[in-house]
Image (cartoon, rainbow, N blue to C red):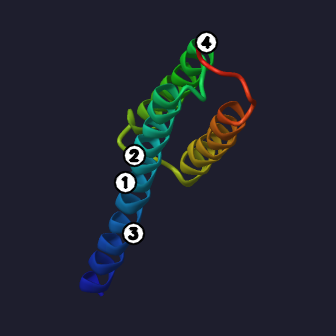
Amino acid sequence: MKLKITAVAIVMALGITSVNAQIRQTAKHQHLRIQQGVKSGELTKSEAANLRNDQKDIRTEAKDAKADGIVTRDERVAIKQDQKQESRKIFRKKHNNRERN
């Protein structure tokens, strides 16, 4: 019985770890998309600054969620939802036909 409980705890911890890794990977990918948009001229200075500030807010949200040592399901869902919304925002700003000077 004790072995079974330990096994379940390990599987749950691995699942949570993979979700946290996925959140970090998404943040990294979005940062690279913003950099690419600046480099290609698809993003203006103000658009890039706005997107970077949004990324900073999401990082702060994730840091606050981890502060107590446990990232709850609701916290993970909220972070992932914010990242998804930010991803759409990056796409819209990169494709709005404004060009960097």
The residue singled out by tag 3 in the image is 12
| Mark earlier in primary sequence (3, 4) | 3
> In the rendered structure, are the residues bearing label 1 and label 2 in contact, judged by CB atoms less than 8 Å apart?
yes
* Structural distance between the alpha carbons of marks 4 and 1: 30 Å
Q: For the residue marked with disc 4, what is the amino acid?
A: Ser
- Numbered label tally: 4
At numbered mark 4, what does the secondary structure look like: helix, strand or loop? helix
Q: For the residue marked with disc 1, what is the amino acid?
A: Ala
Circle 1 residues within 10 Å: few <14, some 14–19, many ≥20: few
Depicted 27 relative to depicted 4: above or below: above
Q: Residue at x 65, y 34 (%)?
A: 94
Residue 39 percent coordinates (x, y): 45, 28
Work out which quarter of the rendered image holds the C terminus and state it.
top right
Work out which quarter of the rendered image holds the N terminus and state it.
bottom left
* Structural distance between the alpha carbons of marks 1 and 2: 5 Å
Circle 4 residues within 10 Å: few <14, some 14–19, many ≥20: few
Camera-nearest label, 3 or 4: 4
Depicted 50 relative to depicted 61: above or below: above
Q: Residue at x 29, y 80 (%)?
A: 7
At numbered mark 1, what does the secondary structure look like: helix, strand or loop? helix
Quarter holding residue 2: bottom left
User: Where residue 80 is drawn, which disc sits there?
Assistant: none
Depicted 44 relative to depicted 90: above or below: above
Residue 3 percent coordinates (x, y): 24, 84
* Structural distance between the alpha carbons of marks 3 and 1: 14 Å
Circle 3 residues within 10 Å: few <14, some 14–19, many ≥20: few
The residue singled out by tag 2 in the image is 24
The residue singled out by tag 4 in the image is 46
Q: For the residue marked with disc 3, what is the amino acid?
A: Met
The residue singled out by tag 1 in the image is 21
| Mark earlier in primary sequence (2, 3) | 3
Left or right placement of residue 48 versus residue 27 in this view: right
